[in-house]
Amino acid sequence: MAKEKKSFFERLTGSVRVDDERDEIMEEKEEKNPRKHAPASSSWSDEEEEKDGELTVDVYQTPELIVIKTMIAGVRPEDLDISITRDMVTIKGRREEEKVVKEEDYFARELYWGTFSRTITLPSEIDVDESEAIEKHGLLILKLPKLDKKRLSKLKVKTI
């Protein structure tokens, strides 16, 4: 019997759908794993708070470059860490929230605050030394020159 995924409403409220099939699944789990279950007070949002947020990115290529674009508005340069290898890019950072408004005075809270990270596996190898990062109006642009594996170079022999 396949495990049924919780609905958005169930994850949001922590409620559980009550039906015969669900009861059977829960009984089977308890028989297989007799250890204590998590308390009812824990919810999917508690788990989400422990994880880094994931940046949304656009990744595309031109004949010479791989370009990655992502929004980092509100992130100070010292709170941003970009690591690159020939085939992978990792962007990590932290967006700090100013506490100027009381929690009860909010009508909506949709902005992401806290740590974030994103690792992107690149479709081809890049020249790490020639790569550049540009920030313009909150948009981070990484320009990663592709390595030309077909380029032929002549090596001269030196005599000592």
Image (cartoon, helix red, strand yellow):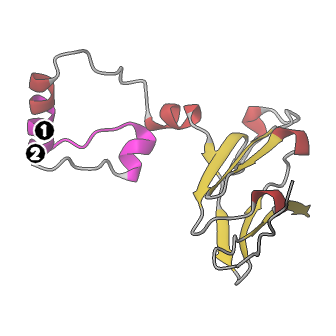
Instruction: Report the side of 160 relative to 125 (left or right).
Output: right
**Residue 139 visible in the current orientation:** no
Residue 41 occupies quadrant:
top left
Q: Which residue is mark 1?
A: 25
Q: Which residue is mark 2?
A: 21
Q: What's drawn in magenta, residue-wise? A: 8-27
Residue 123 lies, in percent from the top left, at 57, 69
Verify CB contact (< 8 Å) between mark 1 and mark 2: yes
Instruction: Report the side of 79 relative to 65 (left or right).
Output: right
Residue 55 occupies quadrant:
bottom right
> What element does badge 1 sit on?
helix
Which of the two residues, 154 or 87, is positioned nearer the viewer here?
154
State how many labels appear.
Answer: 2
| Amino acid identity at mark 1 | Ile
| Amino acid identity at mark 2 | Glu
Label 2 crowd bin: few (<14), some (14–19), many (20+), radius 10 Å: few
Residue 65 occupies quadrant:
bottom right
The reply to whether the magenta stretch includes residue 13 is yes
